[in-house]
Image (cartoon, rainbow, N blue to C red):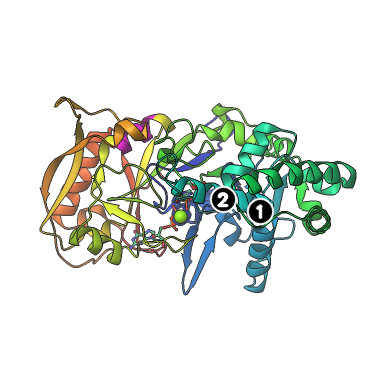
Amino acid sequence: MRPGTGTMNTAITGLQWGDEGKGKIVDLMTSDHDVVVRYNGGANAGHTVVVGEETYALHLMPSGILSPDIQCVIGNGVVIDPTKLLEEIDSLESRGINTNQRLFISDRAHVVLDYHKMLDGALEEFLAGGRSGASIGTTRRGIGPAYADKVLRAPAIRVGDLRYPDVLEERVRIACDLHGEQLASLGWSERPDPEKLIATCRDWGARLGDRIIDTTYFLHDAVKAGKRLLFEGANACLLDVDHGTYPFVTSSNCSALGIPAGTGLPAATVDRVIGIMKAYSTRVGAGPFPTELDNAIGEQIRERGREYGTTTGRPRRCGWLDLVAVRYAAMLCGTTSIACMLLDVLFGLDEVKICTAYRLPDGSTTDRFIPDAHRLSGVEPIYERLPGWDGELDFDGAREQLPDGARRYLDFIEKYLEVPIEVVSVGPERTQTLMASTI
Ligand code: GDP
Ligand code: IMO
Ligand code: MG
């Protein structure tokens, strides 16, 4: 909290491999904020929010859009597929949610075009062909190729360019030439059509219109005016391109460390970071997962937690809670409190296990995470075993009412992480949540 202002700016970040329930918590926290800001990722994200009878799956749209008076910002760090964004806008409008004068898009965010999605698919097929090991298992939403263009510069198209036909034409032609060659060499049959893409880009520019602004000044003005910002992380810390299980990561800084670069706000703008974790672990796509359960318990967790991807529908890999990984993620993100989600999924098990250290191939042990896929794939989890719990989920807002075993489980997590658990979630709905009064 900044002295004298009474404002509290909050970051929501996933502490595992994604799908921790960030959308639910952003929705719950929105009422205490004025502006909800996305700073990373793109349509690879899938944030589910359940409001009464309605379920919303949001990919590019900040989850704050579901609360009427909230402004929403898609910051410069995001890669935007306008087709998807316009679909989301239309779908929300058709469900009675007004997005006009509420959604602002950075003119410096980068645009995902068809050839990025083609390249994403072509690269995945190339890697699956056995040359250099395994494919990443991306969402094929063009995320990696769009961020690659951003760093390459010449072929990149930013949202602001959509409104400047000359710049746009030149860049689309460069990109089509370059990526046409790449697609051919990867054996991909489709080719981008520059004329069609230029026309599409112009149409996007017209449709997104006044929503395209300099969001950096907008956000600084909001901070000066004492507005409260809520940063909605997409993807999650262990998928961070610098700090995750590289190379099985996404292509952005999706830990809280991505906020300054992805918005243009200094890091000190963030007053508190709520780390979102599941009571167990899941992962979609390839990459090391030390506590993965390839057995009936894993299957039970998948079915009870409905662990199928919001974006791709793929079954999520499931496993025991890995606290080595979560403690590392909480450290990186500067996490000030924890939301422990999907605790209901673990009800009814005889025994639950928590990974507290790894055994390395040379027989030694460590309680430090290893953010490198090759080395992490060689570790064996060392577990603490705790008795399971049963009982009715008669839950009206007090942690004391949880069954003893569930409380012991939460106490163990809190002690290991040395960060307080201030939110416990036992179902997808807003009411199925215990929030500490300090939140
Ligand atoms: P996100 O990407 O982090 O926003 O998470 P997703 O929306 O991809 O996946 C989380 C899923 O769990 C969604 O279907 C939520 O509706 C659901 N969910 C959230 N919290 C809970 C909970 O406490 N219990 C159960 N059973 N489901 C939950
Ligand atoms: P939310 O915001 C889960 C994973 C993909 C793949 C890897 C790289 O819903 O938590 P990409 O398409 O980004 O190049 O894929 O990252 N991945 C996610 N997994 N939840 C997400 O987002 C994810 N975003 C990317 O499955 O393994
Ligand atoms: Mg998700």
Residue placed under numbered mark 2 in the picture: 122
Question: Where residue 403 sits: x, y (%)?
Answer: 16, 58
Specify the segment rendered in magenta.
Answer: 325-331
CB under 8 Å between discs 2 and 1: no
Q: Which residue is mark 1?
A: 81
Of all residues, the one furthest to the right in this rendering is 166
Question: Splitting the image into 4 quarters, where does residue 313 fall?
Answer: bottom left
Residue 158 position by quadrant: top right
Q: Residues within 10 Å of mark 1 (few under 14, many from 20)?
A: many
Residue plotted at (76% across, 44% down): 177
111 with respect to 229 (left or right)? right
In this image, 99 relative to 54: left or right? right
Instruction: Give how far across and how far down residue 380 sits, in percent.
Output: 19, 37
Mark 2 surroundings: few (<14), some (14-19) or many (≥20) residues within 10 A: many
Q: Position of residue 114 (x, y in %)?
A: 68, 54
Camera-nearest residue between 96 and 58: 58
Asked if one can make out residue 275 in the rendered structure from this viewpoint, the answer is yes
Tell me which amino acid carries mark 2. Ala
Q: Is residue 318 above or below residue 305?
A: above
Judging from the image, what secondary structure is the residue with disc 2 in? helix
